[in-house]
Image (cartoon, rainbow, N blue to C red):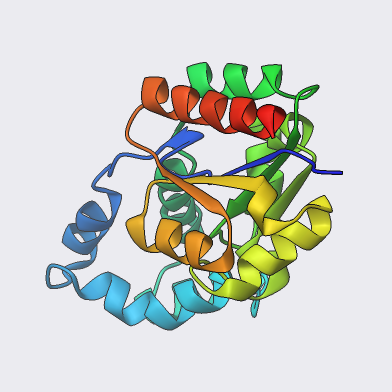
Amino acid sequence: METRCVVLDIGGVLEMTPETGWDEEWERRLGLPTGSMHRRLDDIWKAGSIGRITEGEVRARVAAVLDLDAVRTDAFMADLWDEYLGSPNEELIAYVRSLRTRCRLGILSNSFVGAREREQKLYGFGDLVDDIVYSHEIGVGKPAAAAFEVTCARLGVRPEDCLFVDDAEDNIAAAEAFGMRGLLFADNAETIAGIEAHLTRRRAR
């Protein structure tokens, strides 16, 4: 028996995450050359995205690399999370909530250690879908095939039963190569229409 499934990304899809300029502001405060801060922190960002370090270790390493005291470290991390968490895409979230009785629902997100707790507190994503797969929890992110494999296994569905919605073309291409249907997010109207077409097509087969 076929099980219809929709899997969505978070940042740029369920969350709107425009750049706030927090990093440029911190470079100015610290007297760093433009664009240099993230290069200095790149190893930390990569490790945090696949769960190789804890939140506490992120904080300690950021403070050490940028020579921040406790107060400025708190402010730095708060600014980072403010941009990361963005704002909820209320229309799409409400629509996805309406799908609970129609299909299996999942989230697959390239994330950062600490994201689950914050996103659950702010947006309740854990109550929106059947399962959330975070890169920092499984140790691998999109576009790696393993990320899609874990997602399908945890949702108990076949790749061909799934529609994957993401705002990055590389991730859509990887999902399709894995056997999923892909839908590049452009706006809510097109996304909702695409999901409806997927669900209707699945019912008709």
Residue drawn at x 48%, y 35% as measured from the top left: 15
Rendered view: 97 above or below 78: above
Residue 55 in sight? no
Decide which of 176, 125 is in the foreground and name it.
176
Relative horizontal placement of residue 75, taking residue 121 as reference (left or right): left
Residue 33 in sight? yes
Relative horizontal placement of residue 122, taking residue 152 as reference (left or right): left
Decide which of 168, 163 is in the foreground and name it.
163
* Image-quadrant location for residue 103: top right
Relative horizontal placement of residue 203, taking residue 44 as reference (left or right): right
* Image-quadrant location for residue 171: bottom left
Image quadrant in which the C terminus is located: top right
Residue drawn at x 18%, y 69% as measured from the top left: 35
Rendered view: 51 above or below 193: below
Relative horizontal placement of residue 195, taking residue 168 as reference (left or right): right
Rendered view: 162 above or below 44: above
Decide which of 65, 203 is in the foreground and name it.
203
Give the farthest residue toward the left: 33
Decide which of 1, 72 is in the foreground and name it.
1
Q: Where residue 84 sits in the image (x, y, percent)?
A: 45, 47
Q: Where residue 164 sits in the image (x, y, percent)?
A: 55, 47
Residue drawn at x 69%, y 44% as measured from the top left: 106
